[in-house]
Amino acid sequence: MTDHLLTAADLRRGVELARAGGLPDHPYDQATVGDSECGTACCAVGLAQLALGLEPHWPAEAETDGQPETLRLLRLLMSQRPDILRLVDGVRPDGSLDLVGASLAGAHIARARLDDARLDRASLVGAHLGDARLDGASLVGASLYGAVLVGASLVGARLDRASLVGASLVGASLVGAHLGGADLRGATLDGHDVADLRARGALVD
């Protein structure tokens, strides 16, 4: 542990360094980073620490200033996939994640922690969200055509009028999710009670 407590500004600096290709002695290649053991997580956070003259390591919460924005950024950056950098600009000072209307088509953000995120009307066409946590998230009117949500947790999420045509929801948890007008036609729903989905207002083949 060091005397310096990581702040949201520090983490955002790491993100900007990652977007710019890293530091001279620590390059960041978005084409290959997702295949490494820790991927974006170690790279963006590590770059932030290197810029501060610190030894790169995954910080404990006690090594941050504990502010909601800082903690939300840290949770996001736990993802190994470089596409997670497309989401960080949506983090607000109060720790909320505002991605309303965002264009995230084709994003590979498996295992991303998106609890309580606002993704209303966002484009997630063909996005890879396997094992992602979307509990309490709002995806009203979002487009998830062909999205991969295998094993994702959508407990209490709002999917009203969302398009999930052709999406894969195998093993996804929809406990308490709001499905009024959600279009699940053509979706892969193995393990789900189709009659229950219809009763909750979803459109199902």
Image (cartoon, grey):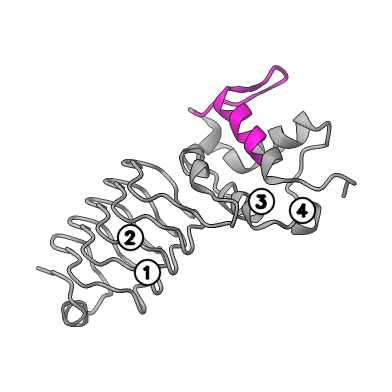
User: In the drawing, what numbered circle is on residue 70?
Assistant: 3
Mark 1 vs mark 3: in front: 3
Residue 37 appearing in the image: no
Residue segment shown in magenta: 11-30
**Membership of 40 in magenta stretch:** no
Report which quarter residue 191 is drawn in: bottom left
Q: Earlier in the sequence, mark 3 or mark 2?
A: 3
Q: Is residue 132 left or right of residue 37?
A: left
Q: Earlier in the sequence, mark 4 or mark 2?
A: 4
Disc 4 target residue: 65
Q: In what element is the residue under mark 3? A: helix
How crowded pointer 1 is (Cα within 10 Å; few <14, some 14-19, many 20+) is rated as: many
Disc 1 target residue: 157
User: What's the amino acid at mark 1?
Assistant: Ala
Disc 2 target residue: 139
Q: In what element is the residue under mark 1? A: loop
User: In the drawing, what numbered circle is on residue 175?
Assistant: none
Report which quarter residue 179 is drawn in: bottom left
